[in-house]
Amino acid sequence: MHHFHYSNGQLYCEGVAVAAIAAKVGTPFYLYSHATLQHHFQVFDRAFGETPHLVCFAVKSNSNLAILRIFINQGGGVDIVSGGELFRALRAGVAPGKVVYSGVGKRPDEIRYALEQGILMFNIESPQELQVLNQAAGQMGRRARIALRVNPDVDPQTHPYISTGLKQNKFGIDIDRSVAEYLIAKQLPHLEIVGVACHIGSQLTQLSPFIETLGRLKELIARLRREDIQIRYLDIGGGLGIQYNEETPPHPVEYGRSIIQELQGLDCTLILEPGRVLVGNAGILVTKVLFTKQTEAKYFIIADAAMNDLARPSLYGSYHGIQPVVEKDRREVTASLVGPICESGDFLAKDRLMPAFDPGELVAVMSAGAYGFTMSSNYNSRPRVPEILVHKNEFYVIRQRETYEDLIRGEEIPICLTGG
Ligand SMILES: *Cc1c(COP(=O)(O)O)cnc(C)c1O
């Protein structure tokens, strides 16, 4: 469900014509619908009903302050993977007691920052991290709340780059070895064990890997309780997929129902870390066609957005719907929608049937709200594009387009090069 729709041949985001926004802010830009974001959060949150739970939005999927604030206003917490994300989330107004910190490579300064703020818990991913955190907490006179992120060795049946719960992945602590690590953690004076955490991957389109994982987590919690280790929080990560093309992922209500059923009688507060499912279909990337080009082999539509703005097609070969911003009668062509970047891997859509866009036309790249802007870069010295939020009949610039000056901020030509 989303609030991008056509009216009189014009693509609208809620009550605002996308073309009108383009005329004001230029192209390319990311565009998000407030109503969609709010609705997605509510549906997801309500899917867990009366079960004690906390929805911790995965900041890495979309870290704009305004987007974070929408979820925080709804009572959400955050899942962070860096000090920078903690900084953003705090700026957006999150309560430190609703922050969980995941990631295999937390730096000492990041650990101290999170300890200072008193976050809800650290999801520990290695035996060494356990020791480092214990030491840092001791030095600061604090006690760190922890969960071990376990690796259940379950195949999420998704793209290999976003699979995280298999034995060969770098994430988590092998579930069979985790009891021994919990026993070590129990002896460390500056740690307080509060949870078990897990995240098996992203863009899952089936429930079975989640259910299989829950089964293993339940067994683990039972074993821990026999060792007199009490588990208050069960963090089952994120990963629920969305429809980009032909996928038919489970609805959040179905997801919630099967999880609640699986965990009956467990007596834990559930923590969920959804990212993509909340923001993915709530955002689009709007770009303008610069040229079309028929080569001997192929037809290219060259737009002003590129792989630096939206990396997913190049990185994962992923599919995004391509739609006109203004509908008109036209033929369809098999074409590749490409950007100006000097790489042949630079495409937004490859060898697909799409409207035969003409130069000057606006194109909407759909389902770009998750891992879109956050994965963008300045490659080819392209200023990062603005982010726009529509709320009913108004739109707001929630991140300005970068300028050329922004591109060189912090750079310096040292004196040895200036003849000084
Ligand atoms: C990326 C990530 C998420 C969010 O994944 P989605 O597929 O966007 O829901 C949640 N938890 C952790 C630990 C992650 O790394």
Image (cartoon, rainbow, N blue to C red):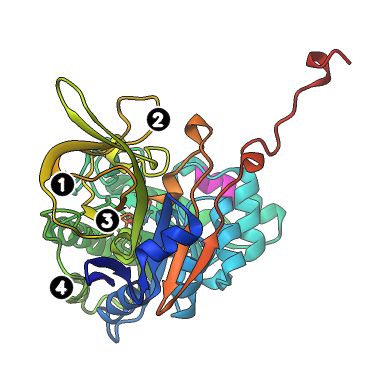
Q: Are marks 3 and 1 in contact (CB under 8 Å)?
A: no
Q: Which residue is mark 2?
A: 341
Q: Position of residue 45 (x, y in %)?
A: 32, 78
Q: Are marks 2 and 3 in contact (CB under 8 Å)?
A: no
Q: Which residue is mark 3?
A: 366
Distance (Cα) linking label 3 and label 4:
24 Å
Q: Looking at the image, which residue is at 14% across and 22% down?
A: 297
Distance (Cα) linking label 2 and label 4:
41 Å
Q: Position of residue 23 (x, y in %)?
A: 45, 59
Amino acid type, label 3: Met
Q: Looking at the image, which residue is at 19% across and 69% down?
A: 255
Of badges 3 and 4, nearer the viewer stands: 3
**Which badge, 2 or 3, comes first in the chain's sequence?**
2
Where residue 254 is drawn, which disc sits there? 4
Decide if residue 273 is in sight here: no
Q: Position of residue 334 (x, y in %)?
A: 12, 38
Amino acid type, label 4: Glu
Q: Quadrant of residue 399?
A: bottom right
Amino acid type, label 2: Ile
Q: Which residue is mark 1?
A: 157
Magenta highlight on residue 152: no
In depth, the one of 62 and 111 nearer the eye is: 62
